[in-house]
């Protein structure tokens, strides 16, 4: 992270000396004089570290310290005292200063003390940031690579991990683009620095700009204090720009400038701030088409995609399905608390037959759902959604099929008692019917209920029972939304169909 340090002293020589010692690309320095300016400055501008001469700290010390301690930056405050008296130092520490430095310290000791203060703050920043991140960062060894497609892909990934160029990760939804970006960061030379993800599609245009580059106080209505942007936070590490295809054009221009000059400018700011950040961008759109249609800047596309990685979809890496499935069975076994040990061969065969439009994420959801539904020790074909179990072709149930009463009933259904057969057929037909209607109405409950000739409340109950969610049928109809509509996870507390 880029650290903001305020030096507050009326002593010209000390100020000059500290400025020299702290001249460092990881630090933005600011010097202030006088008692009142210091706290006002810190409160408005924000500071990670304050180095203040004792003489500029306003009385009463404890309450003026509390003011900065309550700032969102968790400011570390070191006081520089002229006194050598250990008792006095103890009193200053007692008042709440994080460190007491003696003004007359020799160069070497002063440097060591300053380094300790800065690294204390840097560690705290990385720690608080890591609290919001998934616990274990993925490693390359976690990427199942039994398939030739994935082996070849990981060979390329290994070759680029130590370079510091920007990267573009492409691939369908759910293939693991973010997971790969995290692994590249964790395995590369920047692993000690932060990994900062930003979803460019999730924020309004004005908010996205401030999120990325930060803003100065007063730069827009409501900007009462300065705010650090994600590029500053990612200094020394990696910024992950997810859904880069959604970035508005004027921000694409700004991003291109950052990539070229390694400098950002806060919204409403005048000075450039030098940042050292590796950029990894991802998109599940075909960015090349976006460039051709003028929605994405060509220069940025080439700049970002110095190295471009296309993660193979699951349907091109079938050999990886068994290991991925068993990995998820182990993972959900303990989380859900069902002692499932494996998967029946016919269920695994169905996994191999299926096209997996939602990729690894869909496989994960399907395994989780199957474990919830499963009564025995291993997942059977009956625990899988209709589309995967092979029951989507309902043609054999059409009216014409009943004419000679000799319809071809699949063997696995014929093996079941009549009651179970009837229950499953009705349930499967109902799920397929409601899914098709919801898709037709874009998830509109009232319209769907009207077409189905049932009450909205009764439609809701059925959707809940079958794990269908209206959100999955809304908006863009990507392959993910269609697939997850069928395979939405069932909450443990819900009624699960028999
Ligand atoms: N190789 C893998 N092994 C295990 N889990 C994986 C693998 N790849 C992806 N996953 C899991 O699949 C889910 C989706 O991965 P991720 O979010 O990285 O996909 P994505 O490509 O960024 O998807 P989207 O385009 O929808 O944002 C995550 O829960 C991730 O942990
Ligand atoms: Mg993603």
Image: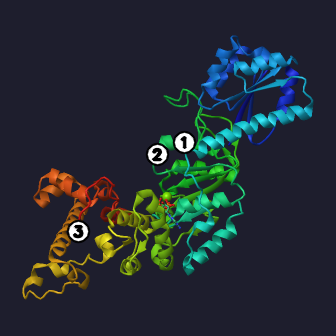
Q: Position of residue 1 (x, y in %)?
A: 68, 43
The numbered disc on residue 203 is: 2
Picture layout, residue 116 above or below residue 87: below
Q: Is residue 179 visible?
A: yes
Quick one: SS at disc 3? helix
Q: Position of residue 11 (x, y in %)?
A: 84, 19
The residue under the point 62% across, 23% down is 43
First of labels 2, 3 by sequence position: 2
The residue under the point 72% across, 63% down is 162
Determine contact: label 1, label 2, CB under 8 Å: yes
The residue under the point 20% across, 77% down is 394
The residue lying toward the viewer, choosing from 361 and 246, is 361
Left or right of 186, for residue 29: right
Locate residue 142: give its quadrant. Answer: bottom right
Residue wearing tag 3 = 432
First of labels 1, 2 by sequence position: 2
The residue lying toward the viewer, choosing from 222 and 339, is 339
Picture layout, residue 80 above or below residue 288: above
Locate residue 417: give its quadrant. Answer: bottom left
Disc 3 crowd, CA 10 A, few/some/many (<14, 14-19, 20+): some
């Amino acid at each position: 992270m880029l650290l903001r340090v305020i030096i507050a002293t009326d002593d010209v020589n000390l100020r000059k000396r500290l400025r020299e010692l702290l001249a460092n690309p990881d630090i933005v320095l600011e010097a202030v004089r006088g008692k009142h300016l210091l706290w006002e400055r810190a409160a408005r501008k924000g500071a990670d570290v304050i180095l203040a001469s004792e003489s500029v700290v306003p009385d009463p010390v404890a309450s003026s310290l509390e003011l900065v301690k309550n700032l969102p930056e968790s400011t570390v405050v070191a006081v520089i005292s002229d006194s050598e008296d250990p008792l006095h130092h103890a009193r200053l520490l007692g008042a709440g200063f994080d460190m007491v430095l003696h003004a007359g310290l020799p160069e070497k000791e002063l440097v060591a003390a300053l380094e300790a203060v800065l690294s204390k703050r840097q560690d705290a920043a990385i720690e608080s940031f890591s609290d919001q991140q998934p616990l274990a960062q993925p490693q390359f060894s976690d990427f199942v690579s039994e398939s030739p497609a994935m082996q070849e892909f990981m060979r390329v990934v290994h070759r680029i991990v130590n370079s510091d160029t920007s990267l573009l990760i492409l691939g369908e939804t759910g293939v693991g683009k973010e997971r790969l970006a995290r692994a590249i960061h964790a395995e590369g030379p920047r692993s000690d620095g932060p990994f900062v993800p930003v979803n460019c599609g999730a924020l309004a245009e004005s908010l996205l700009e401030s999120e990325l580059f930060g803003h100065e106080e007063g730069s827009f209505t409501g900007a009462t204090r300065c705010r650090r942007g994600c590029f500053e936070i990612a200094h020394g590490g990696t910024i992950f720009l997810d859904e880069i295809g959604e970035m508005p054009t004027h921000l694409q221009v700004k991003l291109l400038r950052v990539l070229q000059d390694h400098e950002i400018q806060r919204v409403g700011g005048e000075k450039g701030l030098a940042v050292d950040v590796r950029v990894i961008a991802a998109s599940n759109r075909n960015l090349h088409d976006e460039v051709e249609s003028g929605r994405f800047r060509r220069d940025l596309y080439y700049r970002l995609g110095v190295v471009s990685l296309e993660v193979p979809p699951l349907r091109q890496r079938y050999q990886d399905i068994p290991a991925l499935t068993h990995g998820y069975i182990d993972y959900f076994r303990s989380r859900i608390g069902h002692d499932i040990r494996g998967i029946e061969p016919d269920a695994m065969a169905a996994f191999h037959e299926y096209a997996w439009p939602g990729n690894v994420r869909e496989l994960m959801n399907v395994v989780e759902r199957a474990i919830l539904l499963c009564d025995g020790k291993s997942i059977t074909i009956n625990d899988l959604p209709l589309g995967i179990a092979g029951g989507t072709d309902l043609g054999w149930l059409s009216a014409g099929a009943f004419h000679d009463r000799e319809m071809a009933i699949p063997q696995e259904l014929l093996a079941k008692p009549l009651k179970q057969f009837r229950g499953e057929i009705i349930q499967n037909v109902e799920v397929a019917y409601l899914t098709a209607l919801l898709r037709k109405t874009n998830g509109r409950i009232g319209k769907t209920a009207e077409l189905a000739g049932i009450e909205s409340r009764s439609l809701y109950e059925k959707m809940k029972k079958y794990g269908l969610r209206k959100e999955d049928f809304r908006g863009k109809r990507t392959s993910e939304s269609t697939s997850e509509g069928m395979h939405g996870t069932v909450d443990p507390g819900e009624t699960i169909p028999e």
